[in-house]
Amino acid sequence: IVEEATKGSDVVLTIDANLQNVAEDILQQSVNELKAGVTGTVYDSNFGAAVVMDVKTGEVLAMASYPDYDPNLFVGGISYSDYENISNIGALYSKATQGSYAPGSTFKMVTALAALRRRSGYKR
């Protein structure tokens, strides 16, 4: 029995290519600056993640994880040395999608916004 395919749902990509490139570049630059002590304190970190979302719709506009790697290395088979290199630096683990982080910074913004609204007498 042959069963005809049925059309599935449309997939709409919300990633903004320009914003994605900027997020990747700034994330890499920021991690390197923290390691170099540009902020006045040297941090022993080689990793970072950044996610940019539209707060009104929840759409993901950019998502970056550092260090990263070129996925084209896997096309046609990856060499052992290339795999070992990207594996040793932790690039195969996406910090943006697989990491677990405390939501402290998010709640700081929410608390500050609530305080500002209360102070200004804002009412719905």
Image (cartoon, rainbow, N blue to C red):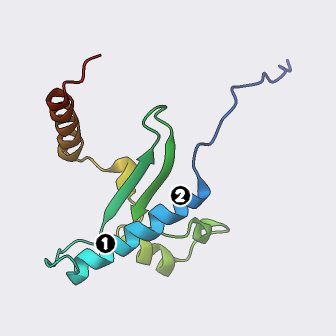
Quadrant location of the N terminus? top right
Say what amino acid the circle numbered 1 marks. Val
Check disc 1 and report its element: helix, strand or loop: helix
In the rendered view, does 124 fall on the left or right side of 50? left
Say what amino acid the circle numbered 2 marks. Leu
- Residue 106, percent from left and from top: 24, 42
Check disc 2 and report its element: helix, strand or loop: helix
Looking at the image, which residue is at 17% across and 44% down?
Answer: 104
Residue 6, above or below 78 = above
Sequence order check, earlier mark of 2 and 1: 2
In the rendered view, does 28 fall on the left or right side of 102? right
Mark 1 crowdedness (10 Å alpha carbons): few <14, some 14-19, many ≥20: some
The quadrant in which residue 72 appears is: bottom right
Residue tagged 2: 19
Looking at the image, which residue is at 46% across and 61% down?
Answer: 23
- Residue 77, percent from left and from top: 62, 69
Q: Is mark 2 in CB contact (under 8 Å) with mark 1? A: no
- Residue 115, percent from left and from top: 15, 33
Residue 110's tag is none
Residue 53, above or below 25 = above
Distance, label 2 to label 1, CA atoms, is 18 Å
Residue tagged 1: 31
Looking at the image, which residue is at 47% across and 73% down?
Answer: 83
Looking at the image, which residue is at 23% across and 47% down?
Answer: 101
Quadrant location of the C terminus? top left
Nearer to the camera, 23 or 113: 113
- Residue 11, percent from left and from top: 66, 35
In the rendered view, does 96 fall on the left or right side of 57? left
In the rendered view, does 18 fall on the left or right side of 85? right
Residue 35, above or below 51 = below
Residue 88 in view, yes or no: no
Mark 2 crowdedness (10 Å alpha carbons): few <14, some 14-19, many ≥20: some
